Amino acid sequence: MANLFSSSIGRKLLMSITGLFLIVFLLVHLTLNSFLLLDGVLGFEEGQMFNAGAHFMATNPFIKIMEPMLAIGFLVHIMYSIGLTIQNIKARGAARYASGSKTDDVEWSSKNMFVLGIFVVSFLVVHLANFWVKMKITGDPLLHQEASFPFMGAEAHGENAYALVNTAFQNIAIVIIYVIGCIALSFHLSHGFWSAFQTIGWNNTVWLNRLQTISKVVAWFIGLGFCVIAIAQYLFF
Ligand code: HEM
């Protein structure tokens, strides 16, 4: 067990598992955020679907358990990425990881995972300060705007998370930060996703090629999905 935390391959395994966990989170997060655009299409009033989703997230016991796990997942992923990068720098560009599986892959994103990660974390700090801190810690007058929405077959009243998000995206500077952060996220995931599968042992050549393609599709679906939401909120809502 100690080896898992201290050996180079053990650390990479932890990064892979936490990375895949974070990708699952991002897919759920993107699904919930897509509600920001879907009210009109599905016949709801503006903001109702997102407010219902935010209410569900805030009140569901399973989500409450997952929140600290998510924070731990991020912290482990970030801490071990710093450790591995320092180790790689010390190894001066020799075989990157102890798996010995240095490939000829010269993908730009694979060589810049750490820098891309810094962009994503910087974005995350701005993002959490904008939304999470206001929703969970400090509060914000926008959250107190009247909000009613359908919930579990009845009409519910709760925080107006939509007003907070929608107001933030009226600021072009914030939209630009989201676009840059989410493009960095796409590049980061386009290497990270298949690399994680390779680390956990899925390295059969046929599947590795397929996973590289799936990885790019998933990565850009997630990153561009978030970008489209931010831009559409600015332009149309
Ligand atoms: C259009 C883009 C996005 C929107 C509108 C959005 C919206 C939100 C909102 C409203 C919250 C607060 C939820 C709550 O406290 O209940 C939140 C939390 C969070 N977001 Fe995003 N988000 C976006 C993109 C992203 C991206 C790209 C990432 C990751 C790189 C991300 C990571 C997180 C994390 C880690 C949390 C904290 C989750 C928690 O513990 O509740 N978000 N987001």
Image (tube, helix red, strand yellow):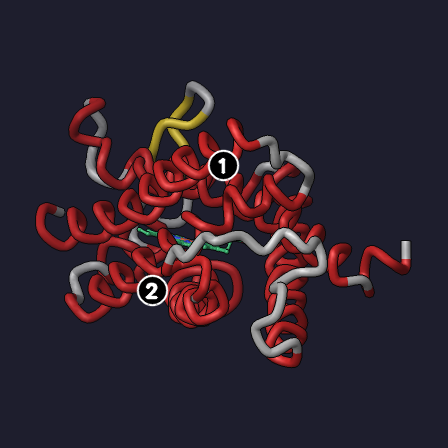
Secondary structure state at the residue bearing disc 2? helix
Going by the numbered disc 2, the residue's amino acid type is: Pro
Residue at label 2? Answer: 141
**Residue appearing at x 52%, y 66% in the figure:** 137
Q: Nearer the viewer, residue 65 or 162?
A: 65
Question: Which residue ends up furthest to the top in the rendered image?
Answer: 153
Label 2 Cα crowd, 10 Å radius (few <14 / some 14-19 / many 20+) = few
Q: Earlier in the sequence, mark 1 or mark 2?
A: 1
**Residue appearing at x 70%, y 51% in the figure:** 13
Secondary structure state at the residue bearing disc 1? helix
Query: Residue 43, position in %: x, y?
Result: 19, 23
Relative height, residue 13 to residue 76 (above, below): above
Looking at the rendered image, the disc whose residue lies closer to the viewer, 1 or 2, is 1
Per the model, the C-alpha gap separating discs 1 and 2 is: 21 Å
Mark count? 2
In the rendered image, which quarter is residue 10 located in?
Answer: bottom right
Q: Which mark is residue 56?
A: 1
Q: Is residue 142 visible?
A: yes
